[in-house]
Amino acid sequence: MKLLSLLSFSLISLSSLPALTASAESNTPPSAESYFPSAAQQLDQLVATSVARDEMVGAEVFILHQGTTLLHRAYGWKNREGKHPMELDSLFAIRSMTKPLTGMAAQLLVDEGKLELDAPVSRYLASFDNDKSRSITIRHLLTHRSGLPVGFSAVMGKPLAEYSGLRELADESGATGPEFLPGSRFLYSDAGSDALGAIIAEVAGQSLETFIEERVLKPLSMAQTFSEERVGEAIFRDRITTRYAGMTGSWTPYWAPSDPPLYRFLKGSGGLLSTPRDYARFLEFWMQSGKTVHLLSAEAIERALSSATKDASTTGFAGAVADYGQMWMLIRDHQRSDKSIGFGHSGSDGTLAYAFPEQQLIVCLFTQSRGTVALRTFEQAISHLFLKPDAAAFARLLPSAEALALDDYLGLYGPENRAKSLGAMIRYKDRLAFELPSRQVMLLRATEDRDQWIPERAPNDLVAFHRTEGRVTGFTLTNRGRATEAKRFIPDPGIPSLDEVASLRNRALPRENVLRVLPLKLTLKGEMAGTVFASSMTMASDGSSYSEVDFGAKGKMRVWAAGDRAWRQLPGQTKPVELHGVERAEELSGSLAALIGDWRNHYRDIVVLGREAFEGSEVLRIRTAPAEGFASTKLVNVATGAVMVDYGISVPPGAGLMPVETRYSDFRLIEGLLLAHEYTVILPGGDANRVKMKVVNVEPRISMEPDTFVPPTN
């Protein structure tokens, strides 16, 4: 919690910063129609840059406007090891983008009277006819409100390859039962989607794959979309991409077209392969309300694209939130109305596709890079280029020349991929630096040799990077004649996806419950070295936050965070100072919105480093890094989703870089939210610099003045 580290330092030494002046920008949106062709060129540049920065191994983009192709281009590698470049109409694993097709299959059966939306699942699958699962309905499965877990791994009693088919997998979900009362809230669920797929097969009297192929794919001329089972067929093999998992600068192939299929049967939650152009045909059918090919009733299309859960998830589309309908993600501009402006879905291997009816626009970005950060940036770019043209906002998405020069070196490094010993090469104010979480940041100075760098505070030491086929694979640190090797960290391909991490956090802090209690205020009391102080943190429904620390006679410290801006007023200062760079990023990532909200909104990179034991609990070690500033490493309880420890680096005013460790304890369930009520902040200097804080009051749905979250201007 960055606020705690900042107030801790303030107790040691109250100092101030010179005032910073914010710059104002004016944007006059051009005509959307005239702007679209040049916007496509700019998007092309952004995606090419993203691949060049190794944020993705390869990609294919397809943009359709009013039935005309604006952009169709391939980037990077289809198979990096074999040096096979990406080609147009390559075949990608679309993972969860299978769900809308499963949903359409269900709607077809509803239209035919063979499936009832509000019928219990137990009518179709006997395994759900028990006290735990009997209340789950077909509608619950379609809307992810069944309570069944996000991943089938949560209910599987054996490896997926050992299951005889989808029915056996669904039966196991029915026997396991939901995690909460069905219908009471949203939880994105692969297990629920798989159960729906099994029901479709049961009602249709044929496999889910056959039903989707005959009733959806063939009528829509989607000849390039098929199930994982067919990857070995000669007509497809040469066009299928190798699949990678990892992070920017560190990708590991986890499946190649020469390997056996990952799945022996199509699941309702995933398992299809497709091309961007083929999936655009599917979106075109829905965008035209089924008028191009008559397959579904108007009522079916309307109910599928109607919101069943408001604010179900977050999105990169500017000024928008993500609702969920019936197997569709719905993009809603919360400032305009309750009506969605677009719909689509994404897949965990790095794919997304959305349609925007008002603009008659379809956008598809397909990659084979599981763990890529590029999808959110792509969504932002679509907003700034096509939906709400904003040239200045788009320009901020493009890296500077100084930033590009450091890209080769950025990433995680350590001895033999040991998660606890990992450090990170980072960009710090356009400088290269090595960050050891909760320990130090070592600034590096370039030499004439591009791969040899000198630690700024140890000019006799040397950091020498190693390359293999042009790519940085590690470095050697020579300190006082002793050489230490560090290899680039390669994430385990089997680590949880970002969706699974979000679902894990959702166990502790369900998004629906968070939204229900806003505006929310936490009041805390703290003590450090005999000094007692009071603090409060408040969060508004739009994510804005206000924090205050009262030092009594010494004055108050105030912090405001709204959107991508932050302000701070220290004791003794007469007015707030707008923050920039690392300090701004630190306050945004330390706000209450970041603590209880969706991490994907606040961090550019989220990497699961591994699993381990901590104080008797199984935890995930997760590194979260903002777009600028320092990362933190969190230990997240696998059973509860609660953060137990946060290791990071803070920048208190006037103190330079400071390692900080925050421990969370005394978790209590408050209105459906699992909130820590005790915090211990550990700073350098022993027990004298240890802060202990307790939450003394939690106030949901408080009344706030309109200007609470905006700093005073005079």
Image (cartoon, rainbow, N blue to C red):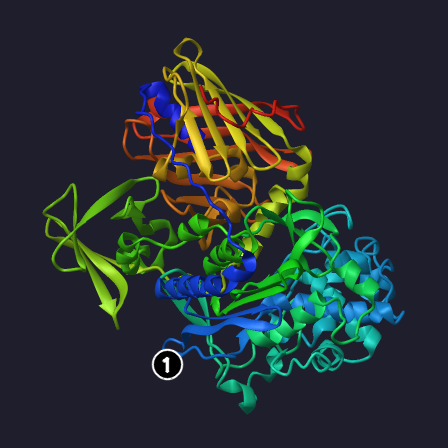
Residue nearest the viewer, comparing 232 with 260? 232
| Residue 41 appears left or right of 694 | left
> Height in image: 369 above or below 563?
below
Say if residue 199 shows up in the picture: no
The mark tally for this picture is 1
Say if residue 209 shows up in the picture: yes
> Height in image: 598 above or below 255?
above
| Residue 414 appears left or right of 530 | left
Q: Quadrant of the N terminus?
A: top left
Farthest bottom residue in view: 234
Residue 155 spot, x, y in % from top left: 66, 60
| Residue 425 appears left or right of 265 | left
* Displayed quadrant of residue 221: bottom right
Residue 193 spot, x, y in % from top left: 70, 63
Residue 573 spot, x, y in % from top left: 37, 17
Pointer 1 local density, CA inside 10 Å: few below 14, some 14–19, many at least 20: few
| Residue 469 appears left or right of 172 | left
Farthest top residue in view: 553
Q: Quadrant of the C terminus?
A: top left
Please name the residue shown 66% across and 25% down the image: 702
Residue nearest the viewer, comparing 565 with 225? 565
State the SS at label 1: loop
Residue 101 spot, x, y in % from top left: 70, 70
Residue at numbered disc 1: 82
For the residue marked with disc 1, what is the amino acid? Gly
Please name the residue shown 28% across and 44% down the image: 429
Please name the residue shown 40% across and 52% down the image: 395
